[in-house]
Amino acid sequence: MNQLSFSTESTSNTRVIASSGVFQIELLEHVGQGDYPTLIEISKHLKSQYGEKAVLTKTTIQKYFNKPGSLPFIVRYRGNIIGYIIGVPLEELSHEPWARLDENFGKENTLYTYAFLIMAQYKNNGYAKMLKRVYLSWAKKRLSIRYITGHVILGVSSRFSGEIKIVNRVDNWQDTGKTFEYYRRDLNPNKSQLQKNNPPIAEKV
């Protein structure tokens, strides 16, 4: 069994991908320990909706953000981190039964959106949309990646644009008491015969 080794570097290695005035999006090529406390503190905003497991730890940052194959971005406002999004290879979630049941598990063609967050006071400024647009654009650049998946609260996926399919629904996701949808986005729908914008299923599965 592979042991998780922790980086001792304190400074993050990032690359600015998009910027507008005091706002910028950076590709996280490596997360330094100096940014761990900020990322962990921001992630606590996810707890009420996504449960305790959504709160980052030093272990999950090292495991997912600094993992080859992951696609993490952070958002800064006036130099401060105010949000992030991260996609991880589906196979990295082999400990989750739902991941192993995905029809694409083992094909190495899927990124799972592990977390997507903009702090509440910075919402409604278009920052989240810009971050998601960058994330999807960079995912498409990876020739091996065909799909993006994720869990969202019931009904949220109906507002997504693009080729979306609801794979299933899960009641009481992560002990939150809420029903979540597991969706799959096709990044190259021209290669498939799926119905465009497949709406959320009417019945629970």
Image (cartoon, rainbow, N blue to C red):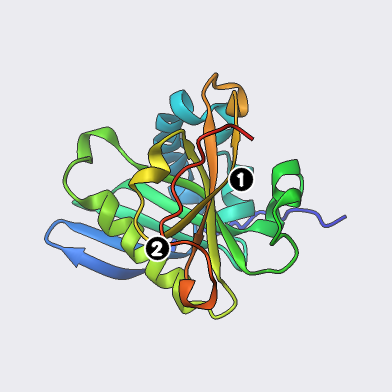
Which sits in the foreground, 76 or 5?
76
Which sits in the foreground, 20 or 140?
140
The quadrant of the rendering that contains the C terminus is top right
Real-space Cα separation, disc 1 to disc 2, in angstroms? 20 Å
Q: Residues within 10 Å of mark 2 (few under 14, many from 20)?
A: many
Q: Residues within 10 Å of mark 1 (few under 14, many from 20)?
A: some
SS for callout 2: helix
Residue at numbered disc 2: 135
Amino acid type indicated by mark 2: Tyr
- Residue 39 lies in quadrant: top left
Q: Vertical placement of 203 versus 159: above or below?
A: above
> Which residue is depicted at the point 39% across and 50% down?
84
| Nearest-to-viewer mark from 1 and 2 | 2
Which sits in the foreground, 93 or 140?
140
Q: From the viewer's perspective, is 92 left or right of 136?
A: right
Amino acid type indicated by mark 1: Thr
The quadrant of the rendering that contains the N terminus is bottom right
Q: Please identify the residue farthest to the left as the structure is shown.
A: 21
Q: Please identify the residue farthest to the right as the structure is shown.
A: 1
User: How many marks are shown on the rendered structure?
Assistant: 2
Residue at numbered disc 1: 60
Can residue 20 be seen in the rendering of this structure?
yes
Q: Where's residue 43, x and y in %?
A: 44, 37
Q: Where's residue 157, x and y in %?
A: 42, 44
